[in-house]
Amino acid sequence: MTAAPEQPAAAERAPAAQGDPRPVAVVTGGSRGLGAVLVERLLAEGWRVATFSRTANAFVESLTERGGDGFLWQPADLHEPRALREFVAEAARRFGRIDLLVNNAGVLHQELFLTLSPKRVDTLIAANLLAPITLAQACARVMTGNGGGTIVNVSSINAIRGYRGVAVYSAAKAGLDGFSRSLARELGPFGIRVNTVVPGFFDSDMTEDVTPQNRERIQRRTPLGRLASVEEIADATLYLCSPRASFITGQTIVVDGGITC
């Protein structure tokens, strides 16, 4: 018979909510792309949302002005673990709880492995694997004081299918997938679900530099014959965050139009 999971120290628990019943989401990289779509849709669904990015932009400034006490943005960098932990602590202090973490932010760099510098390897692993681990730990410690929560990690089809020039990025995302499965088993007794969304090619900042020839090749190899829209990736992500997915944990949901089948 296994022992009950150890509860976090009192200092690590979130303070009681200030009478606001709205749930709280932490979305990383919420200033643009998929992150911005998730932030907007969660706010529209009645969530309070905390997000960070390296710098503010017009989208963040607009939400800060009209979001009232239900929106928090702070500058933070994926390569700075201390700043990430401080961001989570501020979100918990401001809102009194954390119910959802979407580890969306990531860094893609394409270069042949034989020419990749050790520094670049370190930065790719730090941004795409170590940062999500740091954020998951910080948020999970708050969630255990809430009575549960949800973590959704955004991976990539590079984790399950090989492509030239992205070996280290692929390794980091594959590590994130494995981390999610183990974390689901460990945090399940606390009422915390952990799942992974694996997007295929979709219109985003990461794919805007794809040449027309490569885009056509990708579309030919995709059974549905096109790239996904960012809204379709958001749909899958938000489904895993919803009560409709209340018995889904430890799973990897591939949203790629069939290119990996």
Image: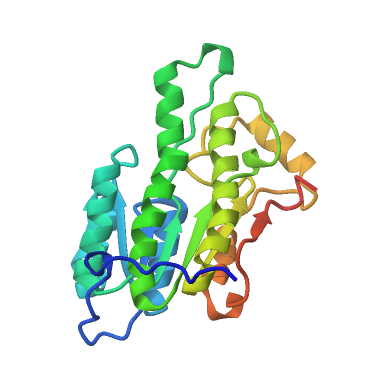
Residue 175 shown left or right of residue 146 in the figure: right
Q: Residue at x 59, y 79 (%)?
A: 244
Q: Residue 37, image x and y in percent? A: 44, 61
Can residue 132 be seen in the rendering of this structure?
Answer: yes
Res 166 visible: no
Residue 127 drawn above or below residue 33: above
Look at the image and tell me in which quarter the N terminus lies: bottom right
Front-most of 84 and 115?
A: 84
The percent coordinates of residue 122 (x first, y second) are: 42, 27
Residue 163, position as x, y percentages in the image: 67, 30
User: Residue 253: x, y in percent?
Assistant: 65, 58
What residue lies at 21% left-to-right and 61% top-to-bottom?
90
User: Based on the displayed image, in which of its 4 quarters is residue 38 positioned?
Assistant: bottom left
- Between 198 and 229, the one lying in front of the other is 198
* Residue drawn where x is 39% and y is 55% of the image: 137
Pick out the residue farthest to the top: 115
Q: Does residue 36 appear left or right of residue 197 in this picture?
A: left
